[in-house]
Image: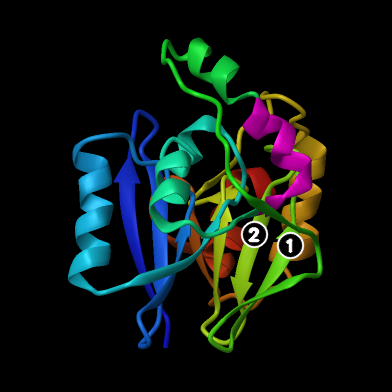
Amino acid sequence: MLQIQGFVFNFASENTYIIYNENKNAWLIDPGNMKGQETQAIESFISENGLKIQKILLTHAHIDHVLGLQWAFDTFKVPVVMHQEDQEVLDMLQASGMRFGMQVDPVKVDVEYIKEGDQLDLDGEKFKIYHVPGHSPGSVVYHHENQKFIISGDVLFEGSIGRTDLYKGNYEQLIDGIKSKLFILDNDTQVFSGHGNPTSIGFEKQYNPFLK
């Protein structure tokens, strides 16, 4: 049985997640932590629960989801998993920081690229990968079929969808991806988003104004 721990970090109230199992093996997803108390919060949780971070997963590479990426890579020395289409977004990190009045160093990490149809495995617990661009070119969703949950990044929120006015954003592409890849999942599939509260596929089908 997998456990999910969420943290809310940085200027954008971004959701960082840790998924872990009874063997204490874990994945760190979208490390948006900034230095100081936010990083300490992650370190404390990992230490107190005796977790071993096996991979760092990115749903996408926008600045608010990767502010702690270099720290995570340097600390845990494990691969960063992402879609190749978002490599250019990660490479633009310094420029993105300047837009927010922040000085951000370029990220230097070892990357493993994933694509639509791939699977990731945490001690036998398998996750499907869906490529759902539109918010960013390489946005992916991680789906655990057995426990019926997805980590959706900024693709789908409670009552909303990701912005499409950013670099290589595409509204029609995002809507089509959500309807064709996520809305075919069971209605009781939980959605853990990149911002805001958890929701469910069934709730979003019924109430999300962008997806009527």
**Residue that badge 2 annotates:** 141
Can residue 134 be seen in this snapshot? no
Helix, strand, or loop for circle 2? strand
Q: Which amino acid does label 2 sit on?
A: Val
Query: What is the x, y in percent for residue 106?
Result: 55, 26
Q: In this view, does 26 lie above or below 110?
A: below
First in sequence: mark 2 or mark 1?
1
Residue at position x 53%, y 86% in the image: 123
Q: Where is residue 166 in the image (x, y as percent from the top left)?
A: 67, 24
Which residue corresponds to the image point at 35% horizontal and 80% vertical from the top-left?
24
Instruction: Please identify the quarter of the rendering in which residue 185 is found.
Output: bottom right
Instruction: Give the residues in magenta.
Output: 82-91
- What residue is at 68 percent from the left and 38 percent from the top? 135
Nearer the observer, 52 or 183: 52
Is residue 8 visible in the rendered structure shown here? yes
In the displayed structure image, the side of residue 148 where residue 31 appears, left or right: left
Residue annotated with mark 1: 130
The numbered disc on residue 182 is none
**Looking at the image, residue 145 lies above or below residue 183:** below
Residue 62 lies in magenta, yes or no? no
Which element is circle 1 on?
Answer: strand
Q: Which of 184 and 57 is in front in this view?
A: 57
